[in-house]
Amino acid sequence: MEAPSPQNKEKAGKEKAVWDFLSSVRLAVFLLITLAITSIAGTLLPQGEPLQFYLERYGPNVFQIIKWLHLYDTYHSWWFLLLLTVFSINLIVCTLKRFPTTLKLYRRDSLSMDPERLERMPFKKRWEVGGDRAAGKMEACAAVFREMAGRLQERNDLGGGRIFLSERGRWSYWGLYGLHSSILVIFIGALVGLFFGFKGHLMLFEGASANRILNQKTGKDIPLGFTVRCNDFFVEFYDSGAPKEFRSEVTILEQGREVLNQAIRVNEPLSYSGITFYQATYQAVPEVIVKIAASDGRQRSFSVPAFERVSWPEERLTLGVMQYMPSVHGAPAARVWVGDERGPQEAFWVLKGQDKEIKRGNGEFTLTLVDAQERYMTGLQVKKDPGVWIVWIGCTSLILGFIVVFWVPHRRVWFWVGSHGGKTVILLSGQTNKNRMQFEKDFSRIQDALDRCLGERS
Amino acid sequence: MIPSSSYLLSLTTFVYLGAAVLYILHWIFRVEKVGVLATVVTVAGCAIQTAGIGMRWIESYQMGYGHAPLSNLYESLVFFSWVIIVVYLVLEWRVKNKVIGAFSTPFASLSMAYASFSKDVQDEIQPLIPALQSNWLIAHVVTCFLGYAAFAVACGLGIMYLLKGKSSGNSGGLLDALPDLRVLDELVHQTIIFGFLWLSVGIITGAVWANEAWGTYWSWDPKETWSLITWFVYATALHARFVRGWAGRKIAFLSIVGFISVIFTYFGVNFLLSGLHSYGSN
């Protein structure tokens, strides 16, 4: 192999420096602090308003900054996404860099020890046993250790003796990877939702149905692939006036066939073929029933929802409801406008029980307000998010990983018997990577038991 | 006759104020008996408060509403102080040091005093509005406040660390009674770990709930964002241990900054910023 040239060496040195920087805890700390500080911006400034709003409220100078930094949508701005990207790279590089070390730790053979190393462990105890009954004692002590320490590994002829090892929680080294990768998993879940999901809104009158919804972001129509019908909407209040329940009774239809009847409440959405409907808002829309009698004897009734118009082509008449009052002197009243090509539009109030005579050109009409009622319109939030399960998996692994990292120790307790300098020696050693206090207690319990075993001199 | 919840909870306020004063007296005069009395008073206060919270729960059923007392600012303040006391008592029992009480119980007293005396805080039992009618309410509030309470105690420990760090050398002062810097550093770390776990679970249960109520698990509303800011601060504190020169003072400092962020998440967002989480503001 060729010796590396100075340039290559320098290049390799630089690469290593970049690699080290990207994997450093220092960068992680810097990113966490930066994310914390920059996140504040979006909570102080109103988000998602039209640009004009910021110009009027903050003046042209601050507006330039807001516009350049996308502070009107901070958490989707280029620099915030860049921070999150660097944060992800930091996590990935850090994981890759530590991986070989962890693998080595995980695979290391804890049985290939020698008595000298055992004596340098943080927890240790040494006994020397003499006399001709030593061999018997050894067996008894090994049995005691076996009983107290649980599952054991064992190897003979190690440094002139036998070694027993009780090891627990070696897998806990992987907890850190579960914890760190969980954040990436959550990001992936969010991206899946962003690219393969949608969010929309659906307003449905009682009795009305829809088979497509409006995408909130793009404004495009999304076909649902089935039909949703609102049968009824209910709103209930407590005596205090606070709302108690918003409920939409909904039916799902596939090719005209009813397949599902369910109520949607706040906190109780309806899911059907991957699409979920949430109770979001409602509107009470008045509907006025008017009867018009023409002077030629023809008459007709119309049901006119507020802000909509109806027409009577035979009489070349169009009318609509502009305003509605549930009670004027105890009777419902509506402001109705009438228009046709026979004259200018006119608007007037009609009270229930008081007919209104109107003249249009050479025709005369009598307008009667037959009845008025409120019709409810339910507002449903519609969502498809195939990434949500990935996010929940990420969240679960975040919590489990955290618990493993901070509370599951890797503990090893060794028991060695052999001869050393003509004497029979017993060594008890132990090591743990967390929760020393508990380990100390457990270790001294084993130590006491062995003390008792050896102390039973007869 | 069974006393009402509002009587029991008002009583708690005074008992906790008394306990805080006793802990501070114990710290200043170092009389063993005062310390024992402080613990006894705190435990008694905790028992009264537990009964008060239980009564409030029962009363809400008698009024026909029937929900856990975790639904508005008053109830959250009461629960906050309850968890601070429980976390502190466990710490006292494990560490066997009562000086920490002088830096922890005042948080619980302040929370109860604010709940009882402030005009902004309505203490009536109110029925649940539709958005709060969910089984996630209990899980979300309990986990969040476990985190908040641990962070309150961590803040107290952080203040102790910074005070003790100043005193190096001059003996005989008040600061002598504080535990060693090494011990305090470890306690700050352990308390932050505990709080961080519960804050994480609290944010996640909130996300699950939001997803069920509104169809989005994360919408960057100010409360959510501030809880994440808090999470970033404590994540920094947990990683700072592995950066040379950051252990000790800087982490103690972060435990105080973190708690300020908790307070802002809890109150500031309700009063100063607007968003989806408006239930907590009255």
Image: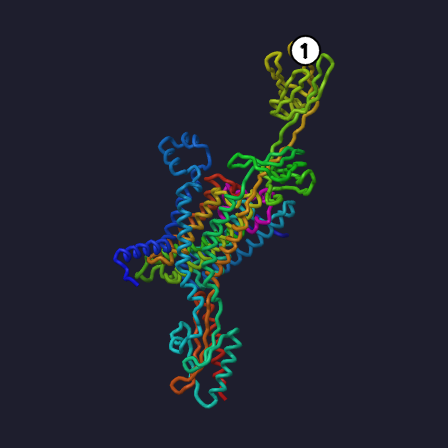
Residue A324 pos. (x, y %): 62, 24
Camera-nearest residue between B110 and A231: A231
Identify the residue shown where x is 40% and y is 41%.
A78
Three-letter residue code for mark 1: Gly
Asked whether A173 or B67 is in front, the reply is A173
Please say whether residue B132 is one of the residues in the magenta stretch: yes
Is residue A176 something that shows in the picture?
A: yes
Numbered marks: total: 1
User: Residue beneath label 1, please?
Assistant: A363
Q: Position of residue A138 (x, y in %)?
A: 48, 84
Percent x, y of residue B223: 48, 44
Q: Name the residue at the right extreme.
A: A297
Examine the structure image and report whether residue A431 is included in the region drawn in magenta: no
Residue that extends furthest to the top in the rendered view of this protein? A362
> Which quadrant would the N terminus of chain A be assigned to in this image?
bottom left
Q: Quadrant of residue A275?
A: top right
How many residues crowd around disc 1 within 10 Å: few (fewer than 14), some, or many (20 or more)?
Answer: few
- A322, above or below B109, in the image: above
Residue A282 rendering spot, x and y as whole percentages = 60, 35
Q: Secondary structure at mark 1?
A: strand
Q: Residue at x 43, y 32 (%)?
A: A51
**Chain that bears disc 1:** A
Is any part of residue B82 visible from this angle? no
Viewer-proximal residue, B138 or A390? A390
Q: Which residues are magenta?
A: B112-139
Q: Is residue B258 above or below residue A106?
A: above
Judging depth in this view, the residue of A269 and A211 nearest the camera is A211
